[in-house]
């Protein structure tokens, strides 16, 4: 899925976990292709299944949720990409 010119991979089932530690920017998208949330982490396994914004995702989705990820090792670059996407798409969940 292309988001702000970045090729995100997915969709994934984050509740099954990932084999390796994955540093990434992740996007939560619904069935209508609406971006619900975007954030980043140095390990996706630590972000799911108890994500602090899950309730917000549920309130703002149309249909099912689909996580997509963009592998980015450098934290500074992850923050830049997250900020760019937040500013461009203004997702309904997360900080503004």
Image (cartoon, rainbow, N blue to C red):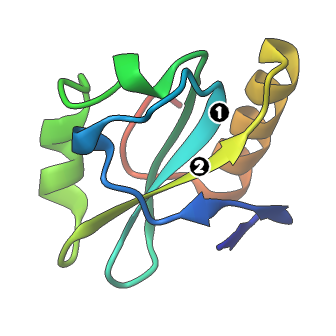
Nearer to us in this view, 60 or 10: 10
Q: How many marks?
A: 2
Q: Is 87 on the left or on the right of 92, as rendered?
A: right
Local SS, label 2:
strand
Residue 39: image location, x then y, percent: 54, 33
- As displayed, is residue 64 above or below residue 15? below
Image quadrant containing the N terminus: bottom right
What residue is rendered at 20% in x and 31% in y? 49
Nearer to us in this view, 53 or 46: 46
Q: Farthest residue in the bottom direction?
A: 32
Local SS, label 1:
strand
Q: Residues within 10 Å of mark 2 (few under 14, many from 20)?
A: many
Give me the disc on residue 76: none
- As displayed, is residue 66 above or below residue 23? below
Mark 2 and mark 1 residues within 8 Å of each other at the beta carbon: yes
Nearer to us in this view, 2 or 21: 21
Q: Which residue is mark 2?
A: 69
Residue 14: image location, x then y, percent: 32, 43
Quarter location, residue 33: bottom left
Q: Earlier in the sequence, mark 2 or mark 1?
A: 1
Quarter location, residue 83: top right
What residue is rendered at 39% in x and 24% in y? 45
Residue 47: image location, x then y, percent: 36, 23
Q: Which residue is mark 1?
A: 24
What residue is rendered at 21% in x and 76% in y? 62
- As displayed, is residue 24 above or below residue 16? above
- As displayed, is residue 65 above or below residue 42? below
Q: Is 71 on the left or on the right of 17, as rendered?
A: right
Q: Is 12 on the left or on the right of 22, as rendered?
A: left
The CA distance from mark 2 to mark 1 is 6 Å
Residue 60: image location, x then y, percent: 22, 59
């Amino acid at each position: 899925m292309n988001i702000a010119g970045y090729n995100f991979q997915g969709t994934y089932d984050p509740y099954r976990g990932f084999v390796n530690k994955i540093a990434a920017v992740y996007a939560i998208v619904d069935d209508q292709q609406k971006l619900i949330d975007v954030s980043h982490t140095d390990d996706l396994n630590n972000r799911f299944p108890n994500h602090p914004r899950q309730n917000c995702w549920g309130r703002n989705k149309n249909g099912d949720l689909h996580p997509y990820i963009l592998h980015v090792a450098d934290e500074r670059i992850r923050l830049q990409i997250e900020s760019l996407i937040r500013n461009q798409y203004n997702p309904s969940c997360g900080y503004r």
